[in-house]
Amino acid sequence: MNLRAGNYRIARGGLHFQRPYLDNGARRFASRLMTALPVLVRSALPEDDAAIRTLNERAFEGPIEAKLVDLLRDAGQAVVSLVAVLDHRIVGHILFSPVTVAEAQAGLRAASLAPMSVLPELQNRGIGSRLVLDGIEACRQRGFDLLVVLGHTNYYPRFGFQKASDHGLASEYDAGDAFMVLELTDGALGKVRGLVKYAAEFNDL
């Protein structure tokens, strides 16, 4: 994998709350973002592919994340893919794909958040967090029990993510504290342990 795993460059932004798994700090954070840009968040469509590719190339200043999105989508591994639309233009994107855990109770479903992007000129305007929160909710509705992310340690905890190592989980990319986990189903963290492996497409970059 060549995806800056230990220092993943997630493009940032913010809005939307009212989720039962958010703590009080995250709720206060979300409340402050109620004046954020009025984006529409919806599922990505095939006709969005080119705009999503350009968006990721601009947000990450290179082709790696854009290629990852293409690989995951083409392999049917994009379990949730959402876009943020502002003035009829795609300005943000988030994707979730399945992961496996070395020791997991049968039937438990887990996914990774990667990548997430916002146009550089619109970052810190309420788009990224809207994508994260709506993406988390979409995963919960699709029956996922856990989410993991390689991301900023001063950003993702506001959505409820915790250090994965505190729950006996490890990343195959030696990410340290940047590897975090979010429980979507009560008790799910007590049913997993060991190495978390990403989709094979992460190693095709």
Image (spheres, rainbow, N blue to C red):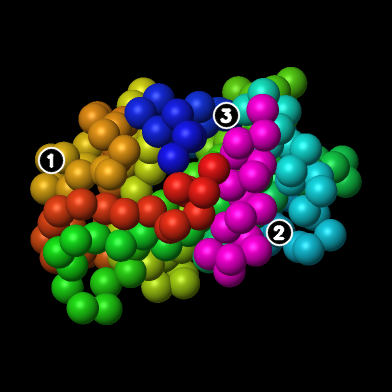
Q: Is residue 190 above or below residue 7?
A: below
Task: Classify residue 190 as left or right of residue 140.
Answer: left
Residue located at (67% from left, 28% from top): 62
In space, the residues marked 2 and 3 are separated at their CA atoms by: 18 Å
Residue placed under numbered mark 1 in the picture: 166
In space, the residues marked 1 and 2 are separated at their CA atoms by: 34 Å
Specify which label sits upstream in the sequence, 2 or 3. Answer: 3
Q: Amino acid at mark 3?
A: Ala
Q: Secondary structure at mark 1?
A: helix
Residue 52's disc is none
Residue 11's disc is 3
Specify few, some or many for label 2: CA neighbours under 10 Å numbering under 14, 14-19, or 20 or more: some
Specify which label sits upstream in the sequence, 1 or 2. Answer: 2
Task: Classify residue 182 as left or right of residue 27.
Answer: left
Q: Nearer the viewer, residue 128 or 115?
A: 115
Residue placed under numbered mark 2 in the picture: 44
Q: Amino acid at mark 1?
A: Asp
Q: Secondary structure at mark 2?
A: loop
**Mark 2 and mark 3 residues within 8 Å of each other at the beta carbon:** no
Residue located at (20% from left, 44% from top): 170
Q: Position of residue 97 (x, y in %)?
A: 48, 58
Q: Residue furthest front?
A: 204
Q: Is residue 30 above or below residue 189?
A: above
In space, the residues marked 1 and 3 are separated at their CA atoms by: 25 Å
Q: Amino acid at mark 2?
A: Ala
**Mark 1 and mark 3 residues within 8 Å of each other at the beta carbon:** no
Residue located at (69% from left, 50% from top): 83
